[in-house]
Image: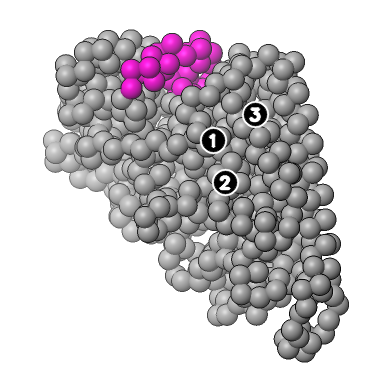
Amino acid sequence: MPLGRALESASVNVLLNKLASQQFIDFFFKWKLDTGLLTKLQTTLQVIYAVLDDAEEKQAENDPHVKNWLDKVRDAAYDAEDILEEIAIDALESRNKVPNFIYESLNLSQEVKEGIDFKKKDIAAALNPFGERIDSKMRNIVERLEDIVKQKDILRLRENTRGIVSGIEKRLTTPLVNEEHVFGSPIYGRDGDKEEMIKLLTSCEENSDEIRVIPIVGMGGLGKTTLAQIVYNDERVKKHFQLKAWACVSDEFEVKRITKALVESATKRTCGLNNLELLQSELRKMLNRRKFLLVLDDVWNEDYGDWDKLRIPLAVGSPGSKIIVTTRSERVASIMRPGKTYPLKGLSSDDCWSLLEQIAFPNGNSYAFPELKVIAEGVARKCKGLPLAAKSLGGLLRSNPNENYWKDILNSKIWDFSNNGIIPPLRLSYHHLPPHLKQCFVYCAVFPKDFEFDIEMLVLLWIAEGFVQQPEGGKEMEAMARSYFFDLLSRSFFQQSSVDKSQYLMHDLIHDLAQFISGKEFLRLEDKAEVVKQSNIYEKARHFSYIRGDTDVYVKFKPLSKVKCLRTFLSLDPLHGFKIYCLTKKVPEDLLPELRFLRVLWLSGYEITKLPDSIGSLKHLRYLNLSYSSIKELPESTSTVYATAKMSSSY
């Protein structure tokens, strides 16, 4: 599969930052580890980092040899980071006492350990096995990286040292765009579409008993959902209909789920019903003899039978009731027997420019920057009328108002390549993110499509995964992570939920981009009944997420025991805590202790009463979420784990 990832630069950048940290250097000297290996590792990584820009552009041209080279870089970077993490853990343990590994190597009893006054020669003897173990692992990584460096010459990868200072890329800061633009942007060029849609919705058809379906059809990124939101919330529309409801359909047209979403949207309350017949009866009662407006957003299903089932409770509405459907498919629209399809076209050149100008320039004023204005106009033309592309590239340009930087974007080779349906402007927006934001964005591929998350959830996950740089000047890690979030929000990588303003999600095309970049390292189960299949397992996968089932049994996860480098075990609940689930105790007792590199363990929402003592063996664990569970206390062994434990009743 051709890749367009550009994540390797972020992984290598993380390593260079860790190697340059004073804590790491001090530990290396304190325990007399081989500093020559440390220097080799730094030098080799800097050489690789210098050619990654060229490699990332070349793999956009579908060069399989470059793709293979980048795969090796990513795997080696992950493994090197795991070794550095082990060293960091030992550094923490050695602050106020002789490290545990010394006790272990001397085979002393606990009583002796607590009272003994070690002699220097005993400590030196104890350090030898530890030093040899670390040196051996580092030597192996250095050799792998040196082989990778040799291959770069065969691939004719060119060095690019811009933005590198002693091997570390400086973080780019991004001023937040005006809130009105961050949370949706002005609707340039859509006034005519809005008025036409409102006419279609409010036109009188009192003689027709048929519910009128109005599909908005167009390619991804055109703003179909945005147009539906605008008319849905217009005061004229609110007055015209007695009841309104919205359901996000997405890839799977599940009648029960959609019916439940419509009931909850109309009532603004959580619905505890899970039986289709009862849900349809409830919806029928709500719609009976009322003029309603329903929105079915992002429909892909082409099976008329499913659509027919969904319509059963809708026939009781009053004449004049309407259904808006947003879809990329003309065939989907035709199956729903519309009165009239509304084809949404791209923005005009002028409107596309106005949207990009408003976001890219301070106060939307390009006239104060004539040189940049010319470049930005060229970028706007290449967006080809796609609002999502204009918004994301506008945020990208605003992040660095430098003429050469803007020219690089305008003249990038990435414009010429579109792989797997990923449109070039979005790939370009990702390609030019600073490394720390690349990691944070791609990590969101761990969520399924249309999954809504809040800022705090992402902040805690990013910190636990090691994506957040150590802040300076007393700033807290959480504050730094939030600034990352708003950086990505200002560049349109996230968007606010139309239902709950405290929640966020990714546009479908942005989500496709994240999944495309993440490759095999991310394993997702997007249906609660799905199980991990041996054939889908990549033994070096790093992140795993799944939708909770009513009862999750061991067989659902068993093949994960072969994924020894897993860092994330994330259970997801679309109901966000309104339901308790069951998890077989074999998972925490037998499976989890084998995943010794876990950094995030999210078991929220399970009816778990206790964790085994073996959970204390997860030395890399940084975040343990047990909220909405039945656990009252943690086993004593967790005191040796440097993790944040969450046992509260909220995310």
Tell me the chief SS of the magenta region. Answer: helix
Q: Amino acid at mark 2?
A: Ala
* Disc 2 to disc 1: CB gap under 8 Å: yes
| Depth check, front residue: 332 or 84 | 84
The residue singled out by tag 1 in the image is 166
- Crowding at dot 3, Cα within 10 Å, few <14 / some 14-19 / many 20+, comes out as many
User: Which residue does the numbered mark 2 point to in the structure image?
Assistant: 20
| Residue bearing mark 3 | 48
Based on the picture, tell me whether residue 423 belongs to the magenta stretch. Answer: yes
Residue type at mark 1 is Ser
Foreground tag (2 vs 3):
2
Residue 143 sits above or below residue 476 on the image: above
Distance Cα–Cα, label 1 vs label 3: 13 Å
Span highlighted in magenta in the image = 402-428
Give yes or no for residue 410 being in the magenta stretch. yes
Tell me the crowding category of disc 1: few under 14, some 14 to 19, or many 20 or more residues within 10 angstroms, Cα based. Answer: few
Give the vertical position of 512 relative to 110 (above or below). Answer: above
Residue at the image position 58 percent from the left and 61 percent from the top:
622
Q: How many C-alpha atoms fall within 10 Å of the one at disc 2: few (<14), some, or many (≥20)?
A: some
Residue 574 position, x and y percent, is 48, 53
Residue at 30% over, 49% down:
501
Find numbered disc 1 in the image and state the secondary structure of the residue it sits on. Answer: loop
Q: Nearer the viewer, mark 1 or mark 3?
A: 1
